[in-house]
Image (cartoon, rainbow, N blue to C red):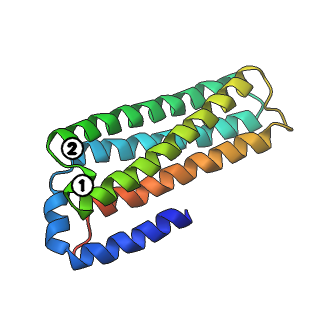
């Protein structure tokens, strides 16, 4: 979170100094994919919240299905991000083309790495739920994995408006 915080502050400062360039670069981003990815991650967080509630009530198989849904959302987010990266690179928008796209690829790339780590945690949680291993003693792992996943979601909630929508000055 600290790393992202530093990046956010530097991005905002540079964006203020290069407002016209950042605004023009932002126009090249696919807001539809960014918006859909926002809904996908919000849905995944809802599924994780529901899974924890169901697991606490002792319904591990049902919780496993909800976690699988969250994992599916993570996979969809990743696929859409790859589609978006491919389109940006094909259009000539690479990290070397300007400061905005350098920030774009660094910020979304680090976020995507966190999505992949979170996907592993969701998979482990899903397996534990399927095996019935998330009773009272297994809840701390489930809650930790859920907190991590919500952090991934929270970061995207900041990244989406920062990169795709911008701030007027």
Q: Residue at x 41, y 40 (%)?
A: 40
**Which residue is disc 2 drawn over?**
88
Give how far across and how far down residue 127 sits, in percent. Answer: 69, 24
Quarter of the image with the C terminus is: bottom left
Camera-side residue: 152 or 85?
A: 85
Q: Residues within 10 Å of mark 2 (few under 14, many from 20)?
A: some
Measure how far apart labels 1 and 2 are at the Cα level. Answer: 12 Å
Q: Is residue 124 above or below residue 144?
A: above
Identified at 72% across, 26% down, the residue is: 129
Residue carrying label 1: 96
Residue at figure coordinates x 78%, y 23% from the top left = 132
Using residue 83 as the reference point, say whether residue 159 is left or right of it. right
Can see residue 169?
no
Q: Where is residue 134, by image quadrant?
A: top right
Q: Quadrant of the N terminus?
A: bottom right
Considering only vertical position in the picture, is 150 above or below 44? below
Position above or below: 45 against 128 = below
Where residue 129 is drawn, which disc sits there? none
């Amino acid at each position: 979170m600290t790393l992202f915080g530093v990046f956010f502050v530097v991005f905002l400062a540079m964006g203020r100094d290069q407002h016209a360039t950042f605004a023009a670069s932002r126009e090249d981003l696919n807001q539809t994919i960014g918006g859909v990815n926002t809904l996908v991650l919000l849905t995944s967080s809802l599924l994780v919240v529901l899974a924890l509630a169901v697991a606490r009530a002792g319904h591990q198989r049902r919780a496993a299905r909800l976690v699988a849904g969250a994992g599916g959302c993570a996979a969809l987010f990743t696929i859409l991000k790859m589609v978006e990266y491919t389109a940006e690179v094909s259009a000539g928008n690479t990290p070397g083309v300007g400061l905005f796209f350098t920030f774009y690829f660094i910020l979304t790339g680090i976020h995507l790495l966190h999505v992949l780590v979170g996907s592993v945690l969701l998979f482990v949680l899903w397996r534990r739920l399927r095996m019935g291993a998330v009773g009272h003693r297994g809840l701390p792992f489930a809650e930790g994995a859920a907190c991590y996943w919500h952090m991934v979601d929270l970061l995207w909630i900041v990244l989406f408006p920062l990169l795709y929508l911008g701030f007027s000055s």
